Structure formats: structure tokens, C-alpha cells
Image (tube, rainbow, N blue to C red):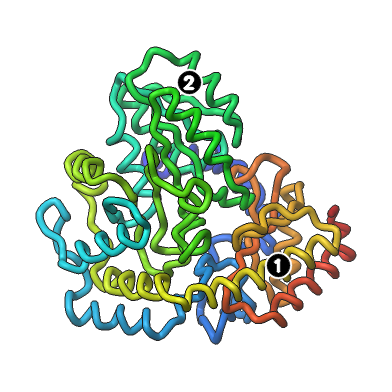
Amino acid sequence: MELPILRMADELMRTGVCRFLRHFEQRFPREHLKDLAVTASGPGRNMVVAGRRVVNFGSDSFLGLDQDERVQSALRAGLKKWGTHNGASRVFLSVEANREAEEKLARWLKTESCLIYPSVTLTNYGAIPALVGRQDIIVADQMAHDSIHTAARIAQSNGVRVQTFAHNDAGDLERILHRSRPYRHALVAVDGVYSMSGDLPPLKDILDVTTANQGVLYVDDAHGTGVLGEHGRGSVLLNLGHYDNVLVVGSLSKAFSCAGGFIGCPAAIQRILKMSSNPYIFGGPVPPPYLEAILTVLDILSSDEFNELKARLDANVEQLTYGARSLGFRVLGGITPIVSLLIGDEAATLRAGHYLFERGFYVQSVIFPAVPYHGGVLRIQVNSNHLRAEIDGLLGALAEMKKELLVAA
């Protein structure tokens, strides 16, 4: 007799997204390049994957701080001081470094308060459902991060109405808010930087519409944290200059090269989240050693050294985007360290990624459902510690790929 758990696995694999992705996994076993294991890392942005040494253009450690000795030293000191984990839900207790990190984050970000979660995804899962009730509505950009839409579905299961609006279209947002009345409050959710395309929303227009319609703007700025604006404070201050009627979520695991996510908010909102946000109440917090490292990263971001790191990063992004456009590729993004080259067809995207891998460069070949169907991209993540020669090498491989694979550009 076949066990139900095996029948369950078989039936799930033959439905929905699993079936679609399994098809490409079976059809392109070499080119698929997913679920890879890195067996060695360094020096610089080099790594060994599947026995091949490649330059890593898939890392979101945008400022290269994962390899900074000060950050690593802070981790080691935190391990010695606090041990490996918190030992309890933060509802009961937190190490002092957690309080220090939240207060220092708030001062750096220029918000009244911050609350740290184990990841950006858990920040969204925890904050969004906690901020709305049955009388409220959530309206999310249709291209917002998956974790925002999943969080909205959690809220929806609690009786909250959920709508989406056309990507970056403040006019469509206004139409949806008007036709959705009556409601008590609206939570309007967008990305600060859209992670697959690298584009930024028209925050001022969206905030104006949101505020005029009894709404609060919620910005997931995971990919802007540490790389946009003065001292890396992100897209909200860069584009709005304030946090009036705005909640901002940031990442501690990308440019910060540590672990966790956070929400910047008024003190009253922080208190509410501590009482009603399930991942905060029932989940384990960021391991204490990383909290010590976060404090060190904040010192670096707050210093003049940030300008040097950002200048190197900007120069690398400009070198790549200029070179890719010169080759005829359609470049998405380029404002942030996420640079996506539109390939289109799923099979062509996988072949293109594998071609570059075989020539010593790892980039992420992204296909549906992470991007629209037939909207496959090569997602290149530029770091400040990429060497200019490495970027030239990648551009040379892209030129060869375009000729040999007949990739449309």
C-alpha cells in the first residue's frame, strides 16, 4: 500500500507551479542552475560551485561588507558575549544588543522607532496583518514582492479586503480606493525598489493619493536599504524627504550583510506590533552575534567611508549598464545594484545563464513565476568589491553569448 504522504507528494508535483518548474528542470538539467551548493568562497567575489570557480554576480551583499574584517570581528565578539541564540521569544526577553540595534537603526534611518524581525519576509508577514482589521483594506502594487502579497492573503483570511493596482500607477490606485469605499483605513503596499526590474515607484504621487484616501503607505525597501540616499538610508528619504504617514521596511541581510529585517515606524506602531505581530511573538529572533555586527555596519554607513563604498558601487553599476546597452541588450534597472537583462523566452534564459556559468560568471537566470511569462531575465547583482576586470570579463562573455546563442537583444 502506498503511503498517503507519497501520494500527496506525487500529486502536488504534477500541479501548478511545481509542474511548470519541474518541466524545465527535467528538460534543462545542466542549464537549470537552481538549488546550487557553494563549496568555497573567496577571494573577493570568487566562489566554487559544482566544481567550477566563478565570479559571483548573484550576491546581494552590495557593499561587500560580508568580507569586512570589522563586521566579522563583531560577529565573533557577539558569539563570545551572547552565545549562539537568544533562547526565548522576544516577548519574554531580548539581549541588550537587540535594543541597542533597534535604537541605533532608528537614529540612522531617522524614524522614531524600529522593530527587528528575523527577515524581511517575516517582517511583512508579521506587520501587514497586524496593522489592519475587518473594517480596513489592503491595496498592493501588483508587482510588489511576493511576501507582501502573501501577507495580504493572511490578512484576507482574517476578513480584510485585498485589492491590487496596476504597477506604479497612482491613478489606478486612486480609482481602486474610491470604488472600495467605505473602509476605515487603507494600507497601501509597494516596493521601494522592485527586485527583478530595479525600477522605483513614484512614491510622492502614491503617497499623495494614499493620504487623501485615509490610507497609510507601506514601503518594502529591502533592496534600497544601504545603497540609496544619504548614508544609504533608502528610497523613502531619498524621494520624499520624510516619513509622514509612511512605514518603511528594510533589510539587514543585503547591503548590511548581516541577518534580519526591520520596520521603521512611530513608537505607537512599534508597541502595537510587539503585542499583535505573530512572527515577533511566536518566532525566534535574529541571533545575538548578528545584532553586534549590525551595530558595526551602522557605524560604517554613518561615516564618510560609506561615500567611498557607494562611489565604487556606482562606478561598477555604470560600467556594467553602459557596456550591456552598448551590446544591444535591453537593460532593466541600473539605478540600484540590480541590473536585469531582458531575454524573454524561458528556455533561452536558462541557456544564457548556463553559457555564462561555463565561462566563469554566475548570474541568476530568472523565469516565470518570479517574472512574467516569457519575461525571463539575467539578473546581475553588482557589488562594490567587484573588480573592473571582472565586469569587463562578464561583458565579453555576454557579447560572445549573444553571437553564439543568437539571443535577442
Residue at left offset 64%, top offset 50%: 197
Q: Secondary structure beneath disc 1?
A: helix
Given residues 241 and 392, the one toward you in this image is: 241
The Cα–Cα distance between marks 1 and 2, rounded to whole angstroms, is 39 Å
Whether the residues at callouts 1 and 2 have beta carbons within 8 Å, the answer is no
The disc label shown at residue 383, or none:
none
Residue 81 image offset from top left, x and y in percent: 17, 79
**Res 409 visible:** yes
Which amino acid does the dot numbered 2 rest on? Leu
Determine crowd level at label 1: few under 14, some 14-19, many 20+ residues with C-alpha closer than 10 A: some
Given residues 182 and 399, the one toward you in this image is: 182
Residue at left offset 59%, top offset 66%: 58
As drawn, is 355 to the left or to the right of 48? Answer: right
The disc label shown at residue 318, or none:
1
Q: If you read the primary sequence from the N terminus, does the residue marked by circle 1 or circle 2 appear first? A: 2
From this view, report whether residue 26 is shown above or below residue 45. above
User: Which quarter of the figure has residue 51?
Assistant: bottom right
Residue 270 image offset from top left, x and y in percent: 24, 46
Given residues 241 and 101, the one toward you in this image is: 241
According to the picture, the residue beneath numbered tag 2 turns out to be 177
Residue at left offset 17%, top offset 41%: 275
Image quarter of the N terminus: top left
